[in-house]
Structure formats: C-alpha cells, structure tokens
Image: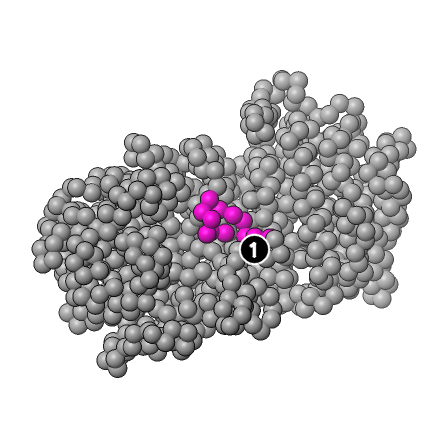
C-alpha cells in the first residue's frame, strides 16, 4: 500500500528507535471533527451542531455534518493506519450518537463503535477512547446550561457508565475529558467555541473536575479493567526576560493554565494556592471531593503545540506575547496561535515531572497546520510538517533520555485533515490529506526524504540518526566518514559521469576539496553555538562525540565516552568560545551563507553548475550532519531555506550506480524551480566549460578564506608544538582537542571582526590536507588560476591559503581505526611529492 505520510512515520521510527524506552506511537481524532453522518444511526444534535448554524461563528461557514465521513470510511482509514505502522489510535465517542436522549442507549450508535474497536484490535492497533471531546448534547445545554451546572455530572457519569459496560472488555485505555481549559475558556468564557457562553469559565472548570473524579470512581469501583486518565492542554510560557518578575509571571501562567486541573488530580486534591489567591470567588471543594480528586488519573494526558513569552505587568498582571524584540518565538504556522517552538516541548515535560513526580505521560496530541497548504501538491511535498514532527520528537526524546521523563505514548494531531472547530476546514492538521469535496484520502507521494532512501544512503550510524553513512548498492560496503565516502564514490562513478573534475579542471577539483573541509568541519562553528546554548541539544552531542570512538567499542560505551567528552568541551566552550557577540555574528554569518547558497541554487541545480560532482556530496555531508539534522539549526534551515534542503535531498540520489539519468535541470515558474531529469547527452549535462566556476558560488568561499584558513594555521602550529613535546616519531593517538585558541568571525554585513575562543582540533587539518595536496600537485599556471579565484573572493586570499600550505608541512595527520595519529612518513616528505 502507498505510504501516506512517510515523513511522520520515518521521523517517529528513527527517534523512538533511538532509545531503550518502549514508546508507542499513532495519531488522534475526535468524533465531531471526523465522523460526519450527523443524521445517521439516531444521532441527535450536539452543541457544535447548534453552534455551527449561527452565522459568523465558523471561519468558512462550514459544519461537521459530513467532515471526513469517517463513519462510513473507518475501514479504509484503519488500513491507512496499519500501513503507517500505528500502534495506537485515539478517538472519541459521540455522546449523542450513543445516547440521543437521557437514559436512552442507541444500539445502532453502539454498534458503530464496536465495529471500529474490533477492526482496530484485529489490525494490531490499541484503541485509546476519549469519553468527552467537546460534543455535549444540545439538549443538556438548553435544559440547565451544560457545564455551568452541577447537573451535568450525573449525565456525564451515566454516559460514561454505558461506554464502560459496552466497550470495557476490549478498551483498556480511557480518557475522561479532553482539554478542559480550552473548551471552558473558549466556549464558556469567551464565547467563540460552542456553546457560545460568556463569563462562566470558573463554573465550567469546577464541574469538569467533579465530573472527572465521579467517572473515575465509577470506573474503578464497578469496572476496573484497564486504566483511565485525563487530557490537558498546555502552552509553555517562557519568561520574557531573566528578571524575577518575568520568571514568576511565567510560572504563574503555567500554574493557572495547567495547574488548575492538574494540581487537584495529581498533587493536592485542590486548586493551586496561587490560583485561589487571584480568584477569591472560586468554588470550594469539600473534603470528600478533594479525596476523590487526588490521584484520580492513572496517567497524564498532554496535548502540546506551542509556547509564548510572559512579561510581568503592574498590579500582579502579566502580558502574554509571541514576540520579543520584534522576533517571533518560533516559525509561524498556518494558525495564528501556533508557533513552532520545539525546545519548549522538553521544558513542558520536565516541568510536569518536577511538579507532579514521575507520572506516566501520554502525549495525546501534537501537530501543526502548514502555511499555504492550499492544494494537494503542497500537501504531498509537506516538508514543513515533517520538520515540525522531527524537531518536536527530538525534543521529547531528550526529555525521556536525559531528564528521565516517563513518556510512554505519542499521538500526532491529527490523523486526518478535519473540521478544526471555529476554523472550519480552513486549517489542515492532518498527516493524511483529505479532499473534503469527495472525502477522498490523498496518498502522499514518496518523493523526498523517505525510509528506503535514507536506509540506502544516510543510514543511522551506531544507532543514531545524525551521522552520514554510505552503504554500497550490494550492501557489502559501509563507509562512515565524508572523506572516505568521497574516495569511494570517486572509484565507482563511470568515466562519462562528471562526478569528479579531472586534472584539466584544477579550480573545480580544488573547490571540491575546499568545500569538503569547510562543510565537514568548520560548519560546526554554526552548529556548536546553537548546541552549547540549548539544553535539548545535549543528547545530540553525546551521539556526535560518541561516533568518534573506535567501532570495536559497544554502542553504550561510545555514548558514555562521547557524553563525557561533550560535557568537557561544553564547559570549556561556554565561558570561552560562545559569547553573545560571537553567537550573534555567527548567526548572521550562517543566514548570510544560506541566503547566498539559495541564490546559487536558484541558478544552478548543483554546486559546480548543471551536473553534480563530488563537491556536492562533500559539502552536503557537513550541511546534513551539522545543520540539517541538528535539533536547533535544522528546523531553521528547513523552514527558511527550503531550496537548500531540496538540494540536500537531491544529492542523496547520487549514490549507487550513479545513473546519469538522475541529473536534473530546472524550470522556474512564479519563482519556484522544478527540477526534471534530462538525458545524459543533453548539452546542459556538463560542468562549466573551461574550468569556469559559477559566479554565484564564489561568495560562499568568503567565510572559508577569512575565518577558517587563519585558524588552520593556528591549529597546525599548536599540533607541531604538541608533537615536539612527544617522543621522536610519535605514532600514538592525537587528542581530539589540544588547546583553546583565539579565532575570529567576520560579520558578513559590516566586515567587522568579532573575536572569540575555539577548541584546536587537529582532525580539521586532516580535512584541509586534500586541498593542500591538490594545490601543490598543480602546475604553476594552474596554481595562478586558483590564486586568482581566491583573490577575487577576498583580497589576498591566495596568500592566506599559501600560509596554510606552509603551516601544514610537518603537521600531517591520518586516521587509523577511527583514531587520529601523526602521519610520520609524510611529515618528512615535501607535500608536492605525495601525489
């Protein structure tokens, strides 16, 4: 069966597999949003049926009468779930489909849910059933005001009792109520959700808690064959500044939003003291009610999407905002309330653990609406949603692995595009696209990053998901380093294929080496400044540094050693190498570089022109490992520079037999370039003639010349000093880092130099040696051409590189069993003689 949303399943599979924790995954929906069949099987109106009939309440004037027609298409949907590998599926019961009137059970409605539950179980999918997902019977709202009256407690308990008795033999995971804060606030305070009541949130909150503990008591005393929890939503609130007032304001906002419901259930049996202090008119729980409330959940259901800033105001007030200093807290989605803030997910999970102990957390919703997702083509090429899930799942797994948060289950919102409440069908959250005119589920094309491609080209190394590894077509060759990959590809590419510039193209070949050294090593400057400053990159660093240890070590040993090394370097980097000044300048440099790369890729599909060379693969390796797959700069790269991501994904296709028919040319329409395959005989399938370098590529060389090369000279000198302190002809391992030394970063806008400190890593010399060797093997005329190219980028650029050539002599290194050692033989031979 087709892969409907390869992105989500691939991301979840990789992230979840990268831990010993047994985390189940799937997706969620709710009855009114997907079922349709509003007038089928004896169903009576809910408050949403009534609310959607009020003009102006729904953005597009729609309703849920048909929605996704899941009622009639549930079997097809379950096959899609199975194809996606779902282990769990969360859905809600339509109260009015099961009980059209008080005291009346509708067996036809019950039969639908029996069929749904049975089909899920038969296909290996565990059902999570939500009793209430906002579709209160309209009759109860009209009779006594719905959730503003304590009478709703008895009616809800009656409905829950029917559900437990009808489905409890198969359903073992129950959720009493979904997002009480949101539907009480939006539906009973602001009046913008059903039932459209205003000023009654406190009464709604109170009755929700009473109804929840009553239903749990019924479940535990009469049925007790499974477990039951409640799902609460939370928006992480980050202090606007480090001031005590803003920190307290952010904490109070979290407690007011989440603690209002979580504290009574998971902590004290009563409202938080801070909430009671600012709401003296709150209803009071009796001692018996407190007893019933405390501990009335077997797990903590969490719906999490976004974050905001909280700034203290006068008289114990505060201001909630998505912007600080004019900058959004994260990338903007298609929903004005939802900004993409993956780092906040980990913080929220840790906050829950710290406040409520090691409670089991079931992530019952997490998802995003995609900007400009107006047609099927955009939905099919859904990198925005893929990036969202990838970054949020990485953040969640950091909370699990590093912080010890007990997350057991993860469910995306939503399985299907659906009726999104007041937004109607104008916002799409589904991981499966739905054509609402036909209710057709549209398959997502398997065209970009997908499991098969990633396993063949960039497979996980040592159980991680970040390090480039190439597997040959026959599966017998596994190469784990960018330079070794380049050597391998050079040996297998057929002669007509311009994978590697020949000696008659000295500048083009020089750039292949030059870009490799920059991409594989110096690009870490950008990534490191993000990693050292954000907690949720810590686990990434454990894997990154762990991959540097010998393969004979176990995975656990390498991660342990890698973690120790990462922590040591972090302690050195924070006070020395990462300052506000260098961080700001490096971020400017990163964005400037990516803009220039985007400009180049607007003109050419590959680095050296219309044909791919190993320069693409060399540079792609570093871009992939140090930026795209990094949990911090990765999402920035994906969201702001999609042309660069598209290039990286195209370069993935260069492995294997290197079929020239894979070569692409571009057609640009309305500013969007579509790359199409061409025949290898096409005149465009060539490198630039006469060893020319695309003029749009040259600006990318500036930070290499200005910032990387001077530090390579420093590195060579430090290494030579270290070697002089060892025994003659020392052949043992060279430490990964020898010292901390001064370096500089050049502001791309002003040309000003910002100085910082950086670890001296001899491994970087190993990378630059290739360009040095090539340069010295060239003829005098060819060297002059290379010199002129470097000087055209930076005045005196050739002189800087020649200083590197001289410095590398006597500081040669090589790798043996993944360890860096001195190249004793070559250190005694002039470099020009080595080729």
Residue 334 in magenta stretch: yes
Which residue is found at the position 70% from the left and 49% from the top? 588
Circle 1 SS class: strand
Q: Where is residue 813 in the image (x, y as percent from the top left)?
A: 77, 53
Q: Nearer the viewer, residue 345 or 447?
A: 345
Q: Which of 14 and 821 is in front in this view?
A: 14
How packed mark 1 is, by other alpha carbons closer than 10 Å (few <14, some 14-19, many 20 or more), is few
Q: Quadrant of residue 543?
A: bottom right
Horizontal placement of 253 versus 117: left or right?
right
Which residue is found at the position 25% from the left and 80% from the top? 286
Horizontal placement of 483 versus 79: left or right?
right
What secondary structure predominates along the stretch shown in magenta? loop
Where is the C terminus found, in terms of image quarters? top right
Residue 104 in magenta stretch: no
Q: Position of residue 241 (x, y in %)?
A: 60, 66
User: What residue is shown with label 1?
Assistant: 323
Which residue is found at the position 85% from the left and 48% from the top? 804
Which residue is found at the position 80% from the left and 58% from the top? 755
Q: Where is residue 204 in the image (x, y as percent from the top left)?
A: 29, 64
Where is the N terminus found, in terms of image quarters? top left
Q: Please state the extent of the stretch shown in magenta in the rendering.
A: 327-339
Q: In which quarter of the image is residue 78?
A: top left
Any part of residue 437 in sight: yes
């Amino acid at each position: 069966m087709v892969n409907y949303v390869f992105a989500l399943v691939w991301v979840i599979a990789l992230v979840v597999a990268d831990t010993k924790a047994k985390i189940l995954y799937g997706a969620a929906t709710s009855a009114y949003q997907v079922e349709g069949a509003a007038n089928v099987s004896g169903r009576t109106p809910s408050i949403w049926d009534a609310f959607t009939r009020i003009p102006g309440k729904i953005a597009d004037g729609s309703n849920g009468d048909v929605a996704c027609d899941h009622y009639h298409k549930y079997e097809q949907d379950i096959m899609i779930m199975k194809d996606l590998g779902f282990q769990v599926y969360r859905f809600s019961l339509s109260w009015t489909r099961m009980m059209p009137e008080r005291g009346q059970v509708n067996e036809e409605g019950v039969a639908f849910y029996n069929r749904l539950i049975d089909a899920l179980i038969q296909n290996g999918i565990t059902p999570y059933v939500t009793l209430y997902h906002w579709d209160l019977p309209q009759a109860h709202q009209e009779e006594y005001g719905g959730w503003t009256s304590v009478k709703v407690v008895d009616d809800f308990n009656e409905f829950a009792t029917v559900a437990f008795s009808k489905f409890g033999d198969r359903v073992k995971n129950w959720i009493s109520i979904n997002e009480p804060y949101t539907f009480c606030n939006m539906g009973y305070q602001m009046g913008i959700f059903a039932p459209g009541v205003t000023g009654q949130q406190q009464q709604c909150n109170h009755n929700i808690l009473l109804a929840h503990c009553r239903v749990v008591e019924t479940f535990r005393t009469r049925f007790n064959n499974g477990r039951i929890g409640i799902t609460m939503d939370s928006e992480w609130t980050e202090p606007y500044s480090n001031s005590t007032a803003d920190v307290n304001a952010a904490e109070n906002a979290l407690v007011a939003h989440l603690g209002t419901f979580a504290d009574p259930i998971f902590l004290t049996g009563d409202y938080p003291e801070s909430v009671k202090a600012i709401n003296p008119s709150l209803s009071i729980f009796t001692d018996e009610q407190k007893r019933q409330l405390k501990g009335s959940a077997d797990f903590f259901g969490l719906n999490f999407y976004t974050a905001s800033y909280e700034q203290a105001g006068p008289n114990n007030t505060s201001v909630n905002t998505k912007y600080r200093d004019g900058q959004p807290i994260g990338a903007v989605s298609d929903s004005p309330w939802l900004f993409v803030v993956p780092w906040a997910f980990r913080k929220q999970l840790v906050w829950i653990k710290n406040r409520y102990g090691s409670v089991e957390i079931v992530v019952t919703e997490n998802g995003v609406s995609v900007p400009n997702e107006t047609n099927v083509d955009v939905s099919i090429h859904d990198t925005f949603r893929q990036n969202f899930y990838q970054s949020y799942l990485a953040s969640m797994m950091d909370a699990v692995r590093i912080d010890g948060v007990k997350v057991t289950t993860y469910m995306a919102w939503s399985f299907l595009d659906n009726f999104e409440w007041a937004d109607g069908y104008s916002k799409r959250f589904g991981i499966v696209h739905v054509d609402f005119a036909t209710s057709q589920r549209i398959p997502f094309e398997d065209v970009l990053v997908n499991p098969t491609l990633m396993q063949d080209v960039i497979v996980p190394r040592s159980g991680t998901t970040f390090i480039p590894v190439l597997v040959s077509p026959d599966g017998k060759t596994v190469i784990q380093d960018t330079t070794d990959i380049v050597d391998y590809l050079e040996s297998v590419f057929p002669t007509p294929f311009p994978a590697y510039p020949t000696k008659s193209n000295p500048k083009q070949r020089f750039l292949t080496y030059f870009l490799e050294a920059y991409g594989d090593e110096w690009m870490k400057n950008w990534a490191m400044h993000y990693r050292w400053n954000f907690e949720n990159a810590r686990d990434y660093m454990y894997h990154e540094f762990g991959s540097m240890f010998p393969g004979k070590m176990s995975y656990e040993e390498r991660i342990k050693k890698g973690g120790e090394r990462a922590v040591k370097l972090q302690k050195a980097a924070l006070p020395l190498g990462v300052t506000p000044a260098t961080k700001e300048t490096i971020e400017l440099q990163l964005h400037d570089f990516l803009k220039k790369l985007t400009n180049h890729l607007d003109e050419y599909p590959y680095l050296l022109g219309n044909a791919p060379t190993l320069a693409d693969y060399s540079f792609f390796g570093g871009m992939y490992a140090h930026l795209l797959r990094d949990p911090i700069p990765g999402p920035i790269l994906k969201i702001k520079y999609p042309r660069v991501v598209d290039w990286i994904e195209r370069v993935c296709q260069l492995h294997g037999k290197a079929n020239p028919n894979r070569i692409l040319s571009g057609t640009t329409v309305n500013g969007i370039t579509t790359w199409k395959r061409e025949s290898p005989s096409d005149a465009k399938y060539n490198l630039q003639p006469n060893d020319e370098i695309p003029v749009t590529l040259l600006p990318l060389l500036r930070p290499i010349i200005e910032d990387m090369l001077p530090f390579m000279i420093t590195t060579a000198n430090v290494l030579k000093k270290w070697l002089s302190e060892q025994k003659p002809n020392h052949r043992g391992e060279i430490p990964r880092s020898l010292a901390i030394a001064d370096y500089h970063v050049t502001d791309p806008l002003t040309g000003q130099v910002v100085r910082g400190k950086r670890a001296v890593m001899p491994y970087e010399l190993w990378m630059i040696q290739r360009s040095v060797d090539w340069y010295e093997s060239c003829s005098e005329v060819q060297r002059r051409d290379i010199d002129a190219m470097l000087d055209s980028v930076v005045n005196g650029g050739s002189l800087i590189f020649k200083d590197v050539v001289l410095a590398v002599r006597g500081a040669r290194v090589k790798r043996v069993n993944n360890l860096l050692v001195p190249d004793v033989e070559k250190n005694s031979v002039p470099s020009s003689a080595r080729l």
